[in-house]
Image (cartoon, coloured by chain):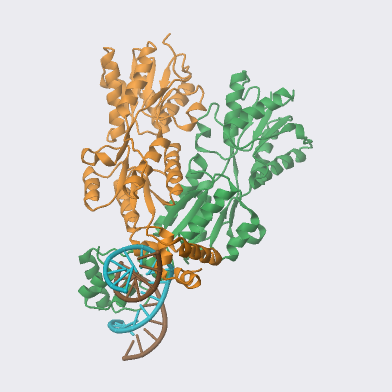
Chain colours: A green, B orange, C brown, D cyan
Amino acid sequence: MATIYQVSELAGVSLATVSRVMNNNAKVSDKTKQKVLDAMAELGYQPNSIAQSLASNRSNSVGVLVSELHGPFFGDMMSAIEDTLRLEGKHTIITSGHSDEQREKESIEFLIGRKCDALILHAESVSDEYLVELEARGIEFALMNRYIESLASRCICLDNRQGGYLATRHLLELGHRQLAYISGPMWKQDAQARLVGHKQALQEHKIAFTQAQLFEGDYRQESGGKGLDYFLNRGQKFTAIVCANDEMASGVMSRARELGIGIPSELSVVGFDNIIYASYLYPTLTTIDYPIYDMGKMAANLILKTVYSKKDVSVKPIFVPKLKARGSSIQRV
Amino acid sequence: MATIYQVSELAGVSLATVSRVMNNNAKVSDKTKQKVLDAMAELGYQPNSIAQSLASNRSNSVGVLVSELHGPFFGDMMSAIEDTLRLEGKHTIITSGHSDEQREKESIEFLIGRKCDALILHAESVSDEYLVELEARGIEFALMNRYIESLASRCICLDNRQGGYLATRHLLELGHRQLAYISGPMWKQDAQARLVGHKQALQEHKIAFTQAQLFEGDYRQESGGKGLDYFLNRGQKFTAIVCANDEMASGVMSRARELGIGIPSELSVVGFDNIIYASYLYPTLTTIDYPIYDMGKMAANLILKTVYSKKDVSVKPIFVPKLKARGSSIQRV
DNA sequence: CTGTTAGCGCATTCAA
DNA sequence: TTGAATGCGCTAACAG
């Protein structure tokens, strides 16, 4: 592996000059520049990124924290981030937090220890204070799907309230009046916002919301089925059910099938996220599109702009969800 | 940020001694060790991993190349790898190759440039020669789901042939005699092996295989539907269809529904991979379980053992697939 | 068991 | 525009 020193020797210039043409941040005459370039080519020179990092105090890598590495949602997010960063020659280091405060912290500290230039965090469990303190420590980061007032410029969010609103309004417009709602874990910000949107849509239609129509799920498939059972056991009447994500909606559909409840003939179902297989289900799932790929890209762009001084990138912090009407929801009969 | 030097000052020992207790690879008296530990704690010392890397020529990071960052399959794989490596304090750097030779090469060189200690590759498009050359260059790596004779000790594979065999045998045991087969892209090793297994099962049952029963898909959802149309348009008779992966099987089921073909009443379907939502489909999909999580873990262990000299890890190179019989396949009527 | 000394490969002052 | 010198923070011989 050739070093910068060998290049400088071959080119007959100083080591500093080689460094300059590499980073081309200082004036070098065209002639010497060419000599250096030739020497680099001849030696097949590849700069040692570790040494660059040590000397420049910049690692050209950004750390990403997601809840889970698997699952359709985070996959798309990571995909967007890596695609975007790599075009600029930046590395993506990933870790997962498993929605656990301790593990999220560990992951974040782990990434900081690795001297990442910036972090992209989908942190659900650490406190606002911790995040604020992170900023105070001088750590650069973007925050996905979480809004903190004092960190507003770092947040990339979906308007979850609006999404919840759209989902419910869709059902109301189809004539449904008796709705059930399966929420995500209520300690999560997005779960709260989606429910707020739901209530707002009900209110607009002068429909009262009662606790009896609410079941708190955990965003996982199984809790969809549990929610359905819960409502059924309580003798609730409802013609439609709103789920705070697609996986729970999928659980509702599976369970309904076991129970012989026709979907959408007897029960309309709406999900949230528009994960890839929502359209593979039967019936295809009506849901709210979460533009996670675009949002991941935007987070990466935010970093590129603020940390790596990339120009010409505009950053949009709030994304607007859209309804994807499909087969699982129909006019109330 | 405290440095090793400040720790040594505070502890009243030499810089080398501090380094020794950090890596605890040399004898240090308990007393001085304690002094150093105290000093580190007092300063909140965190070693600079970049400097460590430069000095030791080891980065404690392993690069991972997958085809796509999204999708259930690779998600599970990355999840396993990261879980395993992080327990040992190693970092996971990810890149995607998009099944494109050029991009796969770029990704690999990118990871090497980042001084990864080792790579875990799910490389589908680069040539065997390139991989062999990689070894010759002294690059450490594990190869997922690809077998190359001369690199055998680096390969972590599923017995795809056996999987293909099991899928088809299952249908034959259910009494089906007229089968159709939708393969993956035939340039992929796993697609070939699965088809070989299919043929083997047919042969055991004295059933001839003809080209007319074969449609080459691309492992994507859409090509499942296309395959079904293809067979139907050619007037093929078949009571069951084997798909080389679950996504195509899902495509077959969607298309069958559009056409009013009952599954499994009129057509049994079997997939391959057992991706997470195979059990969410309706009917639930009979498939071949691909223990990708375990295999990812194994790849990480292989690296830990060979590159990081971790003891007590046994590495199993070949994994055996198992049949998951579910709702999409029934006795021929 | 501990300290001294040299680098690892590069970026970046400061002079020239 | 170029070069010489210094240091980033740490590891790893080599002595003692």
The C terminus of chain A: image quadrant: top right
Q: Is residue A202 visible?
A: yes
User: How many marks overall?
Assistant: 0
Image check: D3 left or right of A310? left
Residue B58: % across, % down = 35, 58
Please identify the quarter of the rendering in which residue B295 is found.
top left
Residue B77: % across, % down = 42, 40
Choose between A175 and B271: the one closer to the eye. Answer: B271
Choose between B247 and A125: the one closer to the eye. Answer: A125
Q: Is residue B124 above or below residue B323?
A: below
Q: Residue at x 35, y 38 (%)?
A: B314
Residue that lies at the very extreme toward the top in this rendered image: B333
Q: Residue at x 48, y 60 (%)?
A: A113
Residue C2: % across, % down = 40, 69
Q: Is residue B138 above or below residue B183?
A: below
Q: Is residue A39 above or below residue B197?
A: below
Q: Residue at x 71, y 23 (%)?
A: A233
Image check: B297 left or right of A44? right
Image check: A107 left or right of B186? right
Please identify the quarter of the rendering in which residue B150 is found.
top left
Image check: A52 left or right of B147? right
The N terminus of chain A: image quadrant: bottom left
Choose between A172 and A160: the one closer to the eye. Answer: A160
Q: Is residue A330 visible?
A: no
Residue B186: % across, % down = 28, 32
